[in-house]
Image (spheres, rainbow, N blue to C red):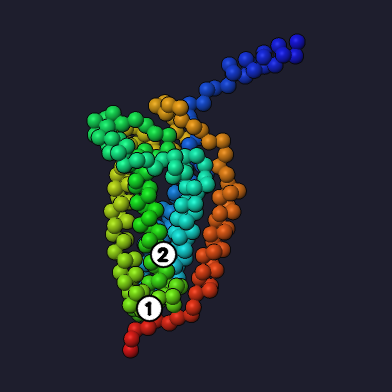
Amino acid sequence: MTEQIVDAVESTTAIDSPVDTHLKIWDLPTRVFHWLLVVSFIAAYVTNWLGVSYFTYHLWAGYFVVILLVFRILWGIVGTHHARFANFVRHPIESIRYALHLTKGKAKSYPGHNPLGALMVLTLLLVLLLQAVTGLFANDEIFNIGPLYGYVSHELSLKLTAVHKELFYWIVGAVVFHVGAVLFYVFVKRENLIKAMVTGKKPVHGLHEAKTIDSSRIWLALVLIVIISAVLAWIIVAAPEASLDLGY
């Protein structure tokens, strides 16, 4: 009798409950990382553009970028299913095949990053991290120096400063390409990647055997952020004191 009652309740629930037409793909930490990185990069650019009097704010924006990028790299190892590099970085041959299918309008949909999107993610992570780290050793040859300037010679600092400045233009180019690709998917392929990075969900249609995530592992993300921030703070505080050496 009890089993019959349970079966009846489950049957009623199955009928009354609407079928979920979306899969949870992007966890909250990944989504927050994405939008905070956008804000931090803009803040770093604006504070640099405003001049030397805003150098301290530029440094803080740089610190935030470093923390975010190191977090995303670690999250790509221990994070949720679709955030892990192992689950979206694919063989170059598959990336080429996907690009060819894309030109013919036959490219399949992926629950997470598609092969070309994965390449863009890796590229942006690497160049942004390189720019942020070189900025820690940079100097403006006037008043300001990066917090790790004391670890290197003035000549090496100048070289790292040049790399820091040059990379900005490459990053802007990559960002423009990335935004253009996203808009292409939104308006041409009808895949709203922007909405997915806000809600974390993608439509089930076209995603065969895709895995949905059941947790964002927020506590793990918070622990990683605290550890990364503490390590960066220790490196900065422990750095040798230095003054700008102009050679005269």
Residue 96 in view here: yes
**224 above or below 196?**
below
* Depth check, front residue: 126 or 57: 126
Which kind of residue does numbered mark 2 sit on?
Val
Q: Is residue 240 left or right of residue 44?
A: right
At horizontal 44% and vertical 30% (from top left) the residue drawn is 203
Circle 1: element type: loop
Quarter holding the N terminus?
top right
Residue 198 in view here: no
Q: In which image quadrant can residue 184 be found? A: top left
Which kind of residue does numbered mark 1 sit on?
Ser
**241 above or below 105?**
below
At which x and y percent is residue 138? 38, 72
At which x and y percent is residue 178? 32, 47
Q: Which residue is mark 1?
A: 153
At which x and y percent is residue 7? 67, 14
* Depth check, front residue: 53 or 141: 141
Circle 2: element type: helix
At horizontal 42% and vertical 38% (from top left) the residue drawn is 112
Q: Which mark is residue 167?
A: none
Q: Residue furthest toward the right?
A: 1
Q: Which residue is mark 2?
A: 133
Quarter holding the C terminus?
bottom left
